[in-house]
Image: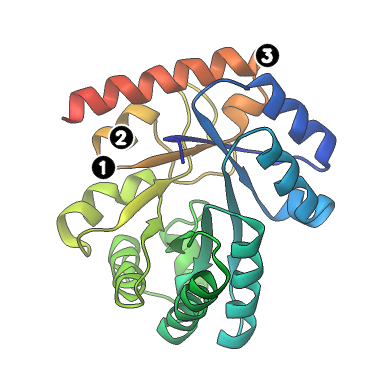
Amino acid sequence: MHRLIVALDFPHQTRAVELVKTLEGLPVSFKVGLQLFTAAGPSVVREIQKKGADVFLDLKFFDIPNTVAHAAVEAGRLGAKMLTFHCLGGEKMLRTARETLEKASAQEGFPMPMLLGVTVLTSFDQAALASLGIDRPLESMVCHLAGIAKRSGFHGLVCSPRELTTLKSSGPAGLVLVTPGIRPEQAPTDDQARAATARYAITSGADYLVVGRPITQAANPRQAAEQLIQEIEDARTERS
């Protein structure tokens, strides 16, 4: 997977594949989320892979352990490089999915995907968390859920850029951090309550960035992607 993952949040396959073609040759991977997968199904994943690109399948699995485990195996068979699971599903759900996937991967020979736990959605702030009856401070909740993912044998987390520093200092060690909610300076945050720039996210410890509208809705998507790629490389140099 490349450091920059472009979110293909489109209502149908045609526009998604057009953007993949537009960005062809750049070091980017692509995220297929709920909207596009519901509209187009597994065929869109296969079509993107035919273009030589890796796919992050972001379906945020959350159900009883058996259901989640079997769905995850199908995603692994599809060739997705990254999969997401809600940590609120609990350790049994996460662990069962991981163990079932590992067994199927070994038996069938498909590569084991990177398993990512979703902590607190980037659209949430403290008030939104409290509305669910969760009074724990947001950053503390993120670290708590990160611990569940770590104990379940997961590879990494999806987290907002605003929790990166806390996770690096207080969260479990050794987890890959995948960060959405990336916005250029002065750009609107849209429905992201906890957004930040690419430079901030990378220097704070993010390993991968997921970027949607700043690229997909840009007047020149390829140029916007190239600028973000450069910003990521500059920030990685600064971090090292």
Residue at image coords 28%, 25%:
235
Kindly identify which residue carries mark 1.
Answer: 205
Give the answer, above or below, for where 183 lies relative to 91.
above
Q: Nearer the viewer, residue 101 or 62?
A: 101
| Residue 107: x %, y % from top left | 53, 75
Indicate the amino acid at tag 2.
Ile
Q: Nearer the viewer, residue 140 or 208?
A: 208
- Label 1 element class: loop
Closer to the N terminus: mark 1 or mark 3?
Answer: 1
Indicate the amino acid at tag 1.
Gly
Kindly identify which residue carries mark 2.
Answer: 202
Report whether 165 appears left or right of 148: left
- Mark 2 is surrounded, within 10 Å at the Cα level, by few (under 14), some (14 to 19) or many (20 or more) other residues, namely many
- Label 3 element class: loop
| Residue 19: x %, y % from top left | 71, 27
| Residue 79: x %, y % from top left | 61, 55
| Residue 179: x %, y % from top left | 42, 45
Kindly identify which residue carries mark 3.
Answer: 219
Report whether 121 appears left or right of 220: left
Q: Does residue 189 appear anywhere in the picture?
A: yes
